[in-house]
Image (cartoon, grey):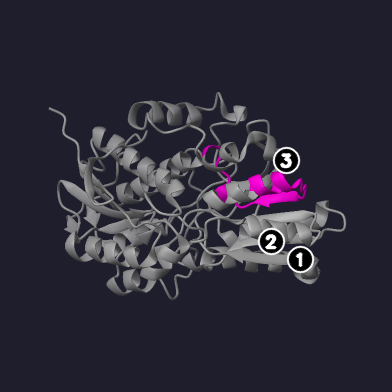
Amino acid sequence: MKTKRRAFIGGVSAVALSASYVAAPYVARAQKKYDDGASDTEIKIGHTCPYSGPASAYGVNGKAIVAYFNMINDKGGINGRKVNLISLDDGYSPPKTVELIRQLVEQEKVLCTHNTLGTACNTAIHKYMNAKKVPHLYLATGASKWGDPKHFPWTMGFQPDYHTEAVIYAKHILANVKDAKIGVLMQNDDYGKDYWEGFKEGLGKEANRVVKHVTYEITEPTVDSQIIQLKAADANVFFNIATPKFAAQAIRKIADLGWKPVHYINNVAASVGSVMKPAGFDNVQGILTAAYVMDPTDPTWANHGDMAEFKAWMSKYHPTAHLADLGNVSGYAVSHMMVETLRRCGDNLTRANIMKQATSFQKYRIPMLLPGITVTTSPTDYYPIQAVQLARFKGQSWELFGDILSAESA
């Protein structure tokens, strides 16, 4: 009889789900070495995500991760060990994240954490994870601070960092918008500030082109008043640094006001399913963003092998999720990275060896990354993905254009 591991979502036991991964052989079995959370039969991993609260649109990421590991377990696990993923709801509240992470590390005794979501939430546990020397891996936040191995050797991000992404937008504006007058909406936390600092760096001597910069708190009901202020400042470019709920609100309010700026939206709020469609397809035409993964709504990838495998996984392991939600792609890609990291550990499932493997990727191809984008890490380079491609919204999907860019090539 087939058995399934249990995952815990929001503190309630639930059957775990999974993704399309074919286990590869690993080299020579040395003497087995284990830290907390590992044994001959199990690897225990911790995860936190906002399944509720103001950023609950990101809950789809967590559900996709749970689904991926269910597939891994159905295929026999990692080097013969089943994965016990414990996924908990922190409501996008840093104090709650601290509480749950302590529970995962000290009570559940997880081997490592995987893709914990949110800049502020991860900031709250950053020092704790490094003091405990527990791998704090592949975070679901692009803050540039996650690439600091000198001071935080146990923490590593995954996606392109916000700072680099914002530099690319700024340089694109300067090269393509005549007499740019820029309005910026920013979530008032570390996530928003990281984008803002990168954006100013990208503008350089042209930073005075920002005619209005407004912020909002995650607890506010709407950003309508902020959008009114930006339009009143006569901005002809809008940089939308917002999480999905507020990004969609901003787009709708812009349409209501009849304002027509050149509109850039940050990658973490570029999901067709959770932002663009709810905002109304008529209202999102021509919006620009930066992408690093294939979008299931883009017909470009209809016959690509990665997309075929992704859709087969969605159909079997994640059937209630919507293909248009990029959170599913993110969860799928980042979980492949974690599985490959653990596979490379072989029978040496110590926390130190996990970090050794996590810092040893060289131009590694992860399914669903855009062609030309690979993963490279080292003991001094904790930024796995450092490139993006610009995209423009057309019809009901994103349309890629131009070259693969990094901050240096922008």
In this image, 217 relative to 341: left or right? right
Q: Residues within 10 Å of mark 1 (few under 14, many from 20)?
A: some
* Magenta-span inclusion, residue 242: no
Q: Nearer the viewer, residue 301 or 93?
A: 93
Q: Which residues are magenta?
A: 251-273
- Identify the secondary structure beneath mark 2: strand
> Which amino acid does the dot numbered 1 rest on?
Val
Cα distance between the residues tagged 1 and 2: 7 Å
Q: Secondary structure at mark 3?
A: loop
Picture disc at residue 130: none
Residue reaching furthest to the right: 179
Q: Which residue is mark 3?
A: 286
Residue hosting label 2: 184
- Is 170 left or right of 194, judged from the image as shown? right
Contact, CB < 8 Å: mark 1 with mark 3?
A: no
Give the crowd class for mark 3: few <14, some 14-19, many >=20 residues within 10 Å.
some
Does 7 sit above or below residue 149?
A: above
Q: Are marks 1 and 2 in contact (CB under 8 Å)?
A: yes
Crowding at mark 2 (Cα within 10 Å: few <14, some 14-19, many 20+): many
